[in-house]
Amino acid sequence: MNDIKDPMTRVGVIFSSGFFGFFAHAGFLAALREMGIRPCAWAGSSSGAIVAAFAASGMDDKGIRDYLFGVRREAFWDPYPWWQVAGKALKGFKGLDGYLRGEAFMGLMEVLPEKTFEDCPHPIAIAATNLTQRRETVFTSGDLRRAVCASSSVPMLFRPVEIEGCLYVDGGVTSKAPILGLLSIAKVDIVLIHFIASRGISGTGNGFLKKAFTPWLIHDMSVDIARLESYRHQKSLAEKTGVRVVEISTGAPPVGPKSLHLGPSAYGHARVEAARMLGGI
């Protein structure tokens, strides 16, 4: 069996989708580097696309850590003016494509050292959901910053990102972790996946019927189940080709737009747990 630290072993790394999971993903990345694991390719979806782009474009751990720890909510929180929203409300919200415009978030991605996929030292695949063509799209070339923003545009929160005439939202909707996307850009022996589980799939049973906002909860659970099944299918297909797929869940505490102060804790937790778990592979 191949050793992930052996320079002859070709390792690909995927960061899964996970709401504001980029702190935990960055901690996982730091552990990889500290252990001397040098992936030959990267992939990501949603928050995972952000860290995959950091890694593939050559950002060092200190730069990533300082950048993420310094991000504040107001730096990306750019809602439409209230009067525009009110006007759309009077028309049944026709044409309202999201709460945030996404321009501020696009500006935050200027931090990427490389601006295109082609300029990155290592190949990278980024998943997004193509609303125009009603399918998943995996970006492997072109504008890296725009692809990352497309993959990270949570539906209803951010407006869709336009790329070459198509509108895109969160890659996590159609691809929790783009395993086949990674395999399309590199020949690997092992795929390491830092997996952040969706909250809607924790546990079993019908306890959700006793919770508030049950219809919305059922909807969210259904979406989470669908993308988990898609992920399992991709994983099965990869393993049938002889690729070893290793899923690692570090269990870092969740972070949201109103709890960014928990980011350093999530980063540290993931870093420590990743080092422990990688050491056992």
Image (cartoon, rainbow, N blue to C red):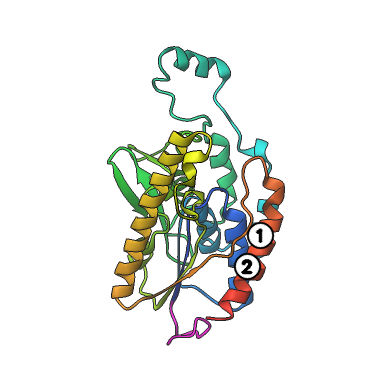
Q: Position of residue 222 (x, y in %)?
A: 38, 45
Q: Is residue 42 left or right of residue 276?
A: left
Using the rendered view, name the quadrant where residue 105 is placed: top right
Q: Residue at x 58, y 36 (%)?
A: 104
Judging by the rendered image, the residue that carries numbered circle 1 is 267
Quick check: is 7 in the magenta stretch?
yes
As drawn, 32 above or below 59:
below
Q: Residue at 30%, 37% (x, y): give it.
A: 132
Compare marks 1 and 2 and give the one earlier in the sequence.
2
* Left or right of 269, for residue 55: left
Label 2 Cα neighbours within 10 Å, binned few <14 / some 14-19 / many ≥20: many
Give the amino acid at mark 1: Tyr
Which stretch did the figure color magenta?
1-10
Left/right placement of residue 22 relative to residue 3 reads right
Q: Where is residue 241 shown, x and y percent of the image?
A: 29, 75
| Observer able to see residue 154 | no
Residue at 60% of width from left, 50% of height from top?
111
Residue 158 lies, in percent from the top left, at 49, 35
Q: Main secondary structure of the magenta part?
A: loop
At 46% from the left and 45% from the top, the residue drawn is: 146
Assess whether residue 33 is covered by the magenta stretch. Answer: no
Disc 2 designates what residue?
30
Q: Could you classify mark 1 by the number of other residues whose Cα lies within 10 Å: few (under 14), some (14-19), or many (20 or more)?
A: many
Task: List x then y, in percent, for residue 69.
Answer: 70, 52
Q: Looking at the rendering, which quadrant does residue 258 occupy?
A: top right
Q: Quadrant of the N terminus?
A: bottom left
Q: Amino acid at mark 2?
A: Ala
Q: Quick one: SS at disc 2?
A: helix
Q: CA–CA distance between discs 1 and 2?
A: 9 Å
